[in-house]
Amino acid sequence: DQQVKQNSPSLSVQEGRISILNCDYTNSMFDYFLWYKKYPAEGPTFLISISSIKDKNEDGRFTVFLNKSAKHLSLHIVPSQPGDSAVYFCAASAGDSNYQLIWGAGTKLIIKP
Amino acid sequence: NAGVMQNPRHLVRRRGQEARLRCSPMKGHSHVYWYRQLPEEGLKFMVYLQKENIIDESGMPKERFSAEFPKEGPSILRIQQVVRGDSAAYFCASSRTSGAVSDTQYFGPGTRLTVL
């Protein structure tokens, strides 16, 4: 039962353009969402998060949008840079067990020069 | 300021042997989490520990798996009598305070376990 879904296994974007990574969830109890970035042979690195009381959070080139009615969130990276090439994971948590992150399967982002 | 350290980075075991994975949290962090990642999947929560206490082990298989975080030394994830299905990447994360998700979890580089 996949509660967090990232339906695009990979995404290719031209350098300088916008990268949009999508994530859908099924559990309406989720109240906190995170994006992590992972390079090969390394652990995930926290990027940005959003609470369910917000619909947008911005940090430099990274913006996360949350649409609660659609149970959908997206990560926008603009402008995309070669160093952004990595696997991006969406994760969510709920309520009292909020340390238990439920992860999507990841989207591999490739930035083309 | 060293990050989360895990060793070994790669571990090969034959079926039936024991695997012991170590995790040293970031300095000042007293909360440790273990996750497992199977190929082509996201990470799956296994266990949450504080010093000398297991807080939540609901994601850990009831048999063959155990975890500890002693007063001194690293956290250990132990897998007894390994089977091929245990082959995965095991990640450890740590956080500073009470385990609230807003307290960022910082991840180690992982241990890749291969069971022959």
Image: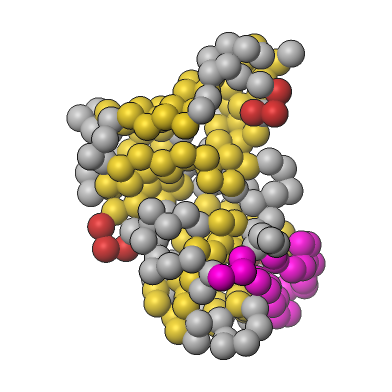
Determine whether B54 is above or below A86 in the image.
below
Determine whether B41 is above or below A59 in the image.
below
Q: Residue at x 58, y 40 (%)?
A: A37
Q: Which residues are magenta?
A: B5-28
Front-lying residue, B58 or A14: A14
Q: Residue at x 40, y 65 (%)?
A: B99
Residue A49: quadrant of the picture: top left
| Image location of residue A64, percent across then percent down | 40, 30
Determine whether A53 is above or below B51 in the image.
above
Residue B10 lies within the magenta run: yes
Image quarter in which the N terminus of chain B is found: bottom right
| Image location of residue A1, percent across then percent down | 36, 48
Does residue A28 appear left or right of residue A5 in this picture?
A: left
Does residue B36 appear left or right of residue B50 in this picture?
A: right
Residue A17 lies within the magenta run: no
Tally of numbered tags: 0
Q: Residue at x 47, y 78 (%)?
A: B50
Q: Is residue B106 visible?
A: yes
Front-lying residue, A65 or B41: A65
Q: Residue at x 61, y 69 (%)?
A: B27
Front-lying residue, B43 or B107: B107
